[in-house]
Amino acid sequence: MRDLPTYTAMEMEKLKMGYRFGRPIFSACIGALLLALIAAGARDARADATPSATPAAGAPAAAAKATPAPVAAATPVPPLSSPGMTGPLVMASPHEINIPKYAPFLSELPAPIAGLLDFDVNGVVSGLGFFQNRAVVGDPYNRLDISNAEAIIQKADGMIQYYVQVGGYSLPALGSPYVNMTKAVNKLYGVLPEAYLKVAPFDNFSIEAGNLPTLFGAEYTFTFENMNIERGLLWNQENAINRGVQLNYSYGPLAASVSWNNGFYSHSYTWVDGLLAWTINPQNTLSVVAGGNAGFAKSSNFATPLLNNNGQIYNLIYTYNAAPIVITPYFQETNIPFNPDIGVLKSTQTISGAILASYAITDKVSVAGRAEYIGTTGNENSPKGSAANLLYGVGSDAWSLTLTPTFQWNQFFFRGEVSYVQANSYAPGAVFGKEGINNSQVRGLVETGVIF
């Protein structure tokens, strides 16, 4: 994920390891889906239980036979602001679960507690299939997998709020080995990837604590949230989910967030991140994001790349959103400072840029695209250890193109994708193919499912 930069030989071996599907993951996914389905059914049942208009007792027979006046359709409840969605996929209206309504004695609880039992539920169930050429050792040439099996439970109003996303997910990322659902859940964020408590004493100020989505980048973590099925090359240099505390404040067109967290999901709470967003007008937004490790973190595992977790990230992101077009160009720089303790004898940077765009052809059909370039400092002739390998070898660079046509009808969606990535100035053995010597890769994907 954003925690999946280019890997060392040891980290590549971790990527290539298989992992058996465990019962706890399956049970959690099934439980999450059942909860979301129950919520959807409860809402439908409430709609069906609404009494229809009938003639009053003793009314004339002619009146009983009269054609009833058409009833205006209920206005759909708009989707909630979380989870974040870049489009073109649209989250469904939330399904309300009001437990005190079905257990009246609970309504006698103090208002703050009773209010927590009135919440909203959504769900996402989807699967994907892909094929690719020049797969690395341990990565399949083709595969079918579950991309999302998640329930989203949240209370988005009141002073005390919460958000819980539970279930399974896979993380396809461009230019990196595929991370299937079992491996993603077991080795990354578990069956509760995002879960946090939010206290909002004022309309323009709130505090959040828990497993939080990152402030960095223009792409989110899960497939259904993004324009494209795969995450991009820039996303691979960012963290994705942080465990920590975040303060949010807004004033007019400005919104700011500051977070203290564990960076790339490490065991050290030494990262400080900040975001400042300016809503110029309803169609234009400009954001600046910056953050990094203010100390030193020794932990390193599948979710925590040692080099990136001891670095810094800087973003400049602009979004133009005026139907039927959405365009998001963004610039990113990452820096791994001099640190002999982790083998970096010379400060090393990535400098990159991307353009993400989508166009709605109709209200059901759209097409999205992404173009990216990323370069790294240093070169293949640098003394060993003088610069860090952050991509496909010291001083390597890469570019990519992705095209994703999408169809969504109510809750159902189907989309296809083709992507191409090419590396340059790479180190032999660090790119694609069984021997790591091919400099390009093509992938084709399809994803289909329901958002309810």
Image: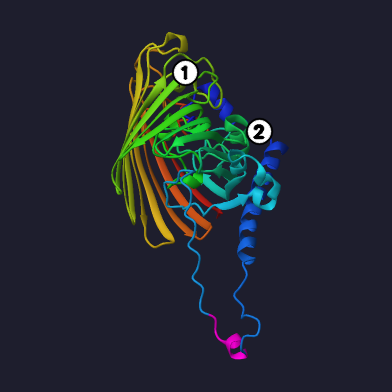
- The residue pinned by badge 2 equals 19
Camera-side residue: 313 or 161?
Answer: 161
Camera-side residue: 247 or 6?
Answer: 247
Task: Say which amino acid is labelled 1.
Answer: Thr
Residue 171 visible? The answer is yes
Would residue 415 appear left or right of 111 to someone viewing this image?
Answer: left
Camera-side residue: 326 or 388?
Answer: 326
| Dot 2: element | loop
Magenta residue check for 63? yes
Residue visible at 55% across and 84% down in the picture: 67
Tell me which label, 1 or 2, sits earlier in the chain. Answer: 2
| Residue 66 location (% of width, % of height) | 56, 86
Separation of marks 1 and 2 at Cα, in angstroms: 31 Å
Residue visible at 67% across and 49% down in the picture: 34
Q: Residues within 10 Å of mark 2 (few under 14, many from 20)?
A: few
What segment carries the magenta color? 61-68
Residue 11 lies in quadrant: top right
Camera-side residue: 250 or 224?
Answer: 250
- The residue pinned by badge 1 equals 270
Residue 16 lies in quadrant: top right
Magenta residue check for 297? no
